[in-house]
Image (cartoon, rainbow, N blue to C red):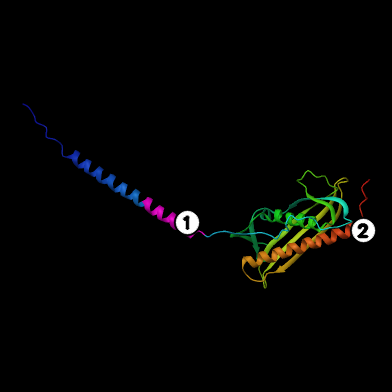
Amino acid sequence: MTRTTEPSTQLPRVGRQLSILRTTMTAKIKLSILVLGVGLAAGCGAARPSKYYQLTVPGDLAPAANPNPVPITLLVGRLTGPALYRADQIVYSSGGESMGTYEYQRWSEPPTEMIAEVILRQFRASGHYRGVYTLRSDIRGEFLLHGRLYDFKEVSGAPIVGRVTMELELRNIKTGTSVWTHFYTHDEPAAGKDVGAVVAALDKNVQQAVAEFRSSLDQYFAEHPPAQPAP
């Protein structure tokens, strides 16, 4: 006796279920991609632009005329400091131990590098020395001027101030001995509460610091005149 087997009705039903599942998953994936794209677009549109600030640096002009400059070549070396001042963030403090940095307001260069450049240009422009160069140059000098930056930040209060604390040292390159040091610290009041006003206060403070360093070093060489070079 021959038995006839009827076609199964389960296979078409399974096929339809798989098709519906694939369609649903595809729709969910497309929706997820669309939501992600909208989120990224919204995030890009809401991004705040960063602002950059710099200190006032004298132009690379010819030194002031001086018929009798101190007969030395002065090399300006590195200005060291904490990690915060070797980066480009603008630092603020409430006056205690804690400090923070602004996210969208930054320096154009790390403060240690900017201040070293101000020192180099100010001393060179004074015309008070036979020559002033950076330590990285190929010029050989008799004295090395270098130092450390301790504070370069906004300090909240009434009023807000720009605090600068730093120390410079003059070293006789031939003997390796330190012959002069000068410590500077000052809080310069800001004219307002915004970051631009604090930057202006810090800039003014740095200019005052470099002027004080120059005056003190001039006095040192007036009291300890270096030997004239042999003809």
**Who's the residue at 47% across and 56% down the image?**
44
In this rendered view, identify the residue nearer to me: 200 or 39: 200
Q: Nearer the viewer, residue 36 or 121?
A: 121
Residue type pointed to by label 2:
Glu
Residue at the image position 15 percent from the left and 39 percent from the top: 9
Q: Is residue 216 visible?
A: yes
Q: Kindly identify the amino acid type of the residue bearing the numbered disc 1.
A: Cys
In the rendered structure, the answer to whether residue 193 lies left or right of residue 217 reads left
Q: Is residue 45 magenta?
A: yes
Label 1: how many Cα within 10 Å (few below 14, some 14–19, many 20+): few
Q: Which residue is mark 2?
A: 223
- In the rendered image, the residue lying farthest to the left is 1
* Residue found at x 70% / y 64%: 202
Q: Is residue 102 magenta?
A: no
Quadrant into which the N terminus falls = top left
In the rendered structure, find residue 215 and report the number of the disc placed on it.
none
Residue 96 visible somewhere in the drawing:
no
The main secondary structure of the magenta stretch is helix
Q: Position of residue 27 (x, y in %)?
A: 31, 49
Span shown in magenta:
32-47
As helix, strand or loop, the secondary structure at mark 1 comes to helix
Left or right of 48 on screen, residue 147:
right
Circle 1 residue: 44
The image quadrant that residue 186 belongs to is bottom right
